[in-house]
Amino acid sequence: MAIEAARLSPSLAAAAILGRRGAPPAALPLRRALPLLLPPRRRRLCFLAAAGGDGRAVALPSSELRKRRGGASSSSSAAPGGGEDEKLRSLRRLLARPDVAIDAYIVPSQDAHQSEFIAECFMRRAYLTGFTGSAGTAVVTKDKAALWTDGRYFLQAEKELSHDWTLMRSGNQGVPTTSEWLNEVLPSGCRVGIDPFLFSFDAAEELKDAISEKNHELVLIKDLNLVDEIWGESRPEPPKERTRVHGIKYAGVDVPSKLSFVRSQLAENGCNAVVISLLDEVAWLLNMRGSDVPNSPIFYSYLIVEDTAATLFVDNNKVSEDVLEHLEKAGVKLKPYEAILSDVERLAENGAKLWLDSSSINAAIVNVFRSSCERYVKKRGKAGRQIGKESSQGDPATGSSGVQNGTVNALYKVSPATLAKAVKNEAEVEGMKSSHLRDAAALAEFWCWLEGQVRESVPLTEVQVAEKLLEFRQKQDGFIDTSFDTISGYGANGAIIHYRPTPESCSSVESDNLFLLDSGAQYIDGTTDITRTVHFGEPTPRQKECFTRVLQGHIALDQAVFPERTPGFVLDVLARSSLWKIGLDYRHGTGHGVGAALNVHEGPQSISYRYGNLTALQKGMIVSNEPGYYEDNSFGIRIENLLLVKEVDLPNSFGGVSYLGFEKLTFVPIQSKLVDLSLLSPSEINWINEYHDEVWEKTDSYMLDTETYNCTYIGTEVVFTRMRIVDCFLGSKIIPRIHHSKII
């Protein structure tokens, strides 16, 4: 699943949106309590890379866009009578309310845990704007409304935003960041409001610093989230599903051992406690899983680990007897989710030194701690004591330089669980390998079924295809859920990088264009993510060339060998080089981390053109390999496998350095009729042949019971039983060995 690189790290996301870093030591005043988990579209304006006399991008209304595209109509409807959207009108009334009194309000995509995928009741930005992509930031002033999103969602946002919104294409030349835009459109000295629970501390401080250039004040809104206020009773109920124990067979390491590791890190860094707020880190540390968030086996909670205690803050109704017993054995106490702030206050008032990951922990929690520390100082009579950040010299994972004189109460540093979770243990690696082979069997059967349906001209929509794939996966042992909403895009829809079909607006899957299918699954023992692009008819020379160059990039990254301590951005060029040679590229990262029976998008590692992420790839990490190419309003191409970072045995070790490479986890065929052989080198041809041999060998024993299909997915028509699906679908008759000049 393609991902914008900044999404892998909340701090990197903040840097991408705000365009700068820096965290002033002064605390922001907290002005409300922790929110409980309470229940609770059209002409467009889009930024185009064109036309400004000063060289900047300019906004064009959707009517102009439709003219340029030949009269295509919008899929959204305008507000009644063409007037202002009612949600915006209601929000602007709140801006002017005396107890709010702000000039602009920022609505991010995240929940209080900086999650990428969130429960429906927290989808505030989607509710307000109508844009349903997973990444974006909305900003509303008294007379303007703008939405920022990255290149994965440009086409989708164009379709979903109403005429009241201006689309800001983040990363395009001349498009301002949110803070730059606010400084441009607001007169000096305005008040900009945010919900402090929805911004990481780093992001809030960076925003505060950026808008201060125009003397704007950052206001932490008192008592309420403004979008929730207008959402009212129609806001969805919060998730209430129970959690479960993630068995030691799959986790590999028990909870006491993981907590012991965290405590050793606390001692090493001179801290008394750490607050864990990222949901996948809580789940990983406690060997628990949940279902509060669609497609992700996580649950809303916080975890505080102290040197002699550990407390899980969660809705007690989500904890079954077996989970309670599991936690008690590990020495973990339970408290209500809403009690997190009072416990942070307790730690501060006791003089504890707290470890906080300021890139992910929300500004509300940090400000409670800082203000409580100030009260503690006054109580102890230590006037003038300075509270700030401490960091280790030369460690890029830590925050900015700390206080030189006086006592420091907080260490701002990446969570001790982040890297430990990313480096998989033996049990997690084994679970990922096993789940990928079962997933490959489901996909092999699915592709043969789909090819037969298309060949027989059976009408199928993109939604029906995605639903059928789910049926095949549900037959596999240990299947729990999909790992994200399936991206099933035929023709022009495939060019929308994170396209999600709906029954009301989807296309039919036919044989006249490319079909891109990006999907994944959550199994009891692992998480999968795979993309394949196919053509059931005759691809054009243009499509074949683009596909082949994407494949060449995929192969180049798969074969990479690199010294230890190499950050992922160094490898990104390998995946793009073949496309660059003819002036093509793609607007997303090449690879993201993947959790073991956890989130399909996981940090801190990534492979991307964004060089801000200096995290080195390490043995045991899992990353995706997914270069692509997208021709707007025509077709999309992406080829994705998951890779395990491994040590490689080489004849030399210059400077005593170890070298790393990749081991494939994904084993599903790549359509060879889309390959332009004239572009391939002998080694690339060998890679394709060897990969398909490996696919056949590894997945044959995973096929299910007997049923006859016809399949011409890549080669000659063959009739086979499902028992021998691998022999025909993946073997020499269907995927002939490719030689240097021809397929025989």
Image (tube, rainbow, N blue to C red):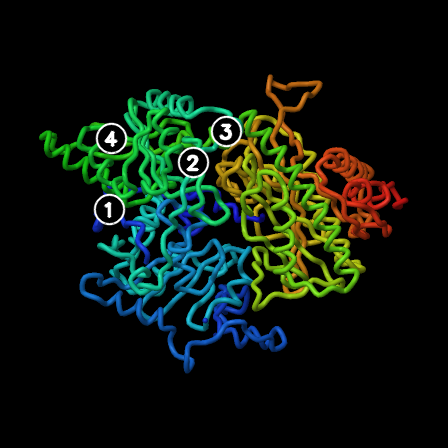
Work out whether 274 lies above or below 223.
above
Mark carried by residue 28: 1
Q: First in sequence: mark 4 or mark 2? A: 2
Which of the two discs, 3 and 2, labels the residue nearer the N terminus?
A: 3
Q: Residue furthest bottom?
A: 81
Q: Does residue 182 appear to the left or right of 696 in the view shown?
A: left
Q: Is residue 131 found left or right of 321 in the rendered image?
A: right
Contact? badges 3 and 2 (CB < 8 Å): no
Task: Tell me the amino acid under the disc marked 3.
Answer: Ala
C-alpha distance separating marks 3 and 1: 39 Å
Q: In the structure shown, which secondary structural element does the residue marked by tag 1 occupy?
A: loop
The residue where tag 2 is placed is: 283
Measured in 3D between alpha carbons, the distance from the residue under mark 3 to the one under mark 4, in whole angstroms, is: 34 Å
Is 623 placed left or right of 100 in the picture?
right
Q: Nearer the viewer, residue 197 or 682?
A: 197
- Residue 337, above or below 77: above
- The amino acid pointed to by label 1 is Leu
* Local secondary structure at mark 4: loop
Residue type marked 4: Asn
Give the residue at mark 3: 251
